[in-house]
Image (cartoon, helix red, strand yellow):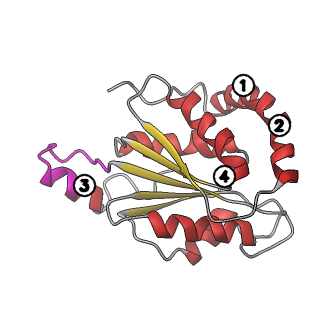
Amino acid sequence: MSGSPPGGPPKPCDTLARSRGDGGTPQCDRVIVVLGYSDGGRDELHPIGAARLARAAEISTAADVVVLSGWARVAGTQPEARLMAAAWAGSAAEVVVDPDARTTVGNAFNALDDIRRVRAKEIVVVTSRWHAARARAAFWLLLRGRHVRITSASPPERWNVGAALRELPLWLLLPAQLWHARQLKGGAETPPRR
């Protein structure tokens, strides 16, 4: 999932690590994960996804790693992550595009590679208010026992009762989705404790 090939040019996080005396090991304190949103019939950013992207751009800094995550629901259309990357207007040390994640758990599991790679101390999940609690829970379950702070940020929006009600049964799917994500990755472990 990483946005840079191994052995490629140093990223700003590498420079930050060297300046901190970490022996050249990349470290960015914060990873911002922007969760895509689509109704499945567009080849452009959905307004909800665009609002999430704008919120991420507001809070991002030049020291952050930003992960843009989301797939293409309809064959022949661009993945949400690539649409977000084309529209990205924020600051970042590095922008990672994850066009493969299909679920909230998939978003979180795919982001683990980058969280581990840069040794992040904080994860900010950018999503809608009605989705934020379940998204934070997915990250927490994957990172429990690690010293990583998990928060969320949401765009200003009206409360969506229908969307909030649709979230309720999805909570029950979290354990099965976590198991399935690990199986797809060949039983990959979560990042080691630091």
Secondary structure at badge 2 equals helix
Q: Which mark is residue 168?
A: 2
Residue drawn 46% across the image and 72% down it = 90
- State the residue position of label 3: 14
Disc 1 from disc 4: Cα separation: 20 Å
Secondary structure at badge 4 equals loop
Q: Amino acid at mark 1?
A: Pro
Towards the viewer: 32 or 155: 155
Q: Is residue 182 magenta?
A: no
Mark 2 or mark 3: which is in front?
2
Mark 1 or mark 3: which is in front?
1
Disc 2 from disc 4: Cα separation: 24 Å
Mark 2 and mark 4 lie on one chain; the one further toward the N terminus is 4
Q: Which residues are magenta?
A: 16-28
Disc 2 from disc 3: Cα separation: 41 Å
Disc 3 from disc 4: Cα separation: 26 Å
Q: Amino acid at mark 2?
A: Leu
- State the residue position of label 4: 100
Residue drawn 45% across the image and 22% down it = 145
Mark 2 or mark 1: which is in front?
2
98 horizontally vs 122: left or right: right
Q: Residue 185 location, x and y as percent? A: 61, 33
Residue 170: image quadrant is: top right
If the image is split into quadrants, where does the C terminus sit?
A: top left
Disc 2 from disc 1: Cα separation: 14 Å
Mark 2 and mark 1 lie on one chain; the one further toward the N terminus is 2
* Crowd tier of the residue under label 2, counting other residues whose Cα lies within 10 Å: few below 14, some 14–19, many 20 or above: few
* Crowd tier of the residue under label 1, counting other residues whose Cα lies within 10 Å: few below 14, some 14–19, many 20 or above: few
